[in-house]
Image (tube, rainbow, N blue to C red):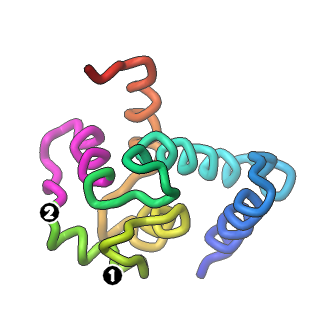
Amino acid sequence: MTKYSLILFACFLSYAISGDLLVRECVDSSVADDFIKLSYIFKTFDIRPKNDFLDFYECELFQRLTDITGGGLPLTWNIWKEITRMVGSNERIGLDMVSLNKTYTTFQHILGTNLDRDWNIVKGMEGIRVM
């Protein structure tokens, strides 16, 4: 585990215990900014039910909405099972914040994830209402 991952994990624990986003006090601003971005993405897609896990359907929606080039692989059940195994999650429950973080840090090069790109796309969706 890298120093960056350990610091981010400490922020997750701090957030889970206190419920506050006062992360900037414990780390430098770039790590705090990444935590805020990750938290925002997570909370945006944790919708059905709001249970602090992103399940297959929530992640599949996230994948479709952030694949702006149309060149990404669709999230199938088999790919989902591999991703959840990779990050140490249960495929039937989904990804928690720590697991989602692993997709952007530990497995970024394997999965092709980019937190800044996804953040900008999700942030750009603000105000769009689904009918």
Residue 118 badge: none
Residue lying furthest right: 25
**Picture coordinates of residue 55, whole percent (x, y):** 34, 60
Type of amino acid under label 2: Thr
Quarter holding residue 31: bottom right
Mark closer to the chain start, 1 or 2: 2
In magenta, the rendered stretch is 59-75
Q: Give how far apart the Cα atoms at labels 1 and 2 are.
A: 14 Å
Dot 2: what SS? loop
Residue 85 badge: 1
Q: Is residue 124 above or below residue 93?
A: above
Q: Is 78 a magenta residue?
A: no
Dot 1: what SS? helix
Location of the N terminus by quadrant is bottom right
**Picture coordinates of residue 100, whole percent (x, y):** 46, 62
**Picture coordinates of residue 78, whole percent (x, y):** 15, 73
Few, some or many C-alpha atoms within 10 Å of disc 2 (few <14, some 14-19, many ≥20)? few
Q: Nearer the viewer, residue 50 or 71?
A: 50
- Residue for point 41% across, 34% down: 122
Q: In this view, does 86 lie above or below 99?
A: below
Type of amino acid under label 1: Arg
Q: Which of 10 and 3 is in front in this view?
A: 10
Location of the C terminus by quadrant is top left
- Residue for point 28% across, 60% down: 56
Q: Is residue 95 above or below residue 20?
A: below
The residue indicated by pointer 2 is: 76
Q: Nearer the viewer, residue 69 or 126?
A: 126
In the figure, is residue 69 to the left or right of 106?
A: left
In the figure, is residue 68 to the left or right of 32?
A: left
Few, some or many C-alpha atoms within 10 Å of disc 1 (few <14, some 14-19, many ≥20)? few
- Residue for point 41% across, 77% down: 89
